Amino acid sequence: MALKVKWSPMSVSNLEEICNYIAKDSEYYAIFFAKKVTTIVKAIPQFPKSGRIVPEY
């Protein structure tokens, strides 16, 4: 069963703010970071249990 990831307006805004902050020093790394995040998010439907469980959880 494929899950669907839906970005909230706040998460989109947060990603943009983070990228803008990184871009102050390096536009290359801001783009690299944004691509990395979106690639990982696109993989979530295929691998919903990937990643680690944080110890606090």
Image (tube, helix red, strand yellow):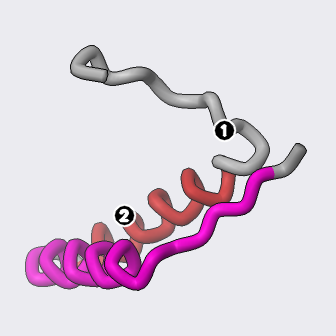
Q: Is residue 12 above or below residue 52?
A: below
Magenta portion: prevailing SS class? helix
- Please, is residue 47 above or below residue 54 in the view? below
Badge 2 crowding class, 10 Å Cα cut-off, few under 14, some 14 to 19, many 20 or more, is some
Residue nearest the viewer, comparing 18 with 55? 55
The residue shown at (21%, 81%) is 17
Type of the residue with mark 1: Pro
Q: Position of residue 37 (x, y in %)?
A: 46, 60
Q: Assess whether residue 18 is covered by the magenta stretch.
A: yes
- Label 1 belongs to which residue? 48
What's the magenta region?
Answer: 3-25
Which residue, as the protein is rendered here, is positioned at the far right? 1
Mark nearer the viewer, 2 or 1 = 1
Pick whichever, 39 or 7, lies toward us. Answer: 7
Amino acid at pointer 2? Phe
Quarter holding the C terminus is: top left
Q: Position of residue 50 (x, y in %)?
A: 60, 30
Mark 1 burial class by Cα count in 10 Å: few <14, some 14-19, many 20+: few
Quarter holding residue 4: bottom right
Q: Left or right: where does residue 3 sit relative to residue 28?
A: right
Q: Earlier in the sequence, mark 2 or mark 1?
A: 2
Give the secondary structure at mark 1: loop
Q: Which residue is mark 2?
A: 33
Q: Is residue 57 left or right of residue 17?
A: right
Furthest-front residue in this view:
57
Where residue 11 appears, x then y in whole percent?
37, 73
Q: Secondary structure beneath disc 2? A: helix
Q: Specify whether residue 26 is painted magenta.
A: no
Quadrant in which the N terminus is drawn: top right
Q: Which mark is residue 21?
A: none
Residue at image point 65% right, 48% down? 44
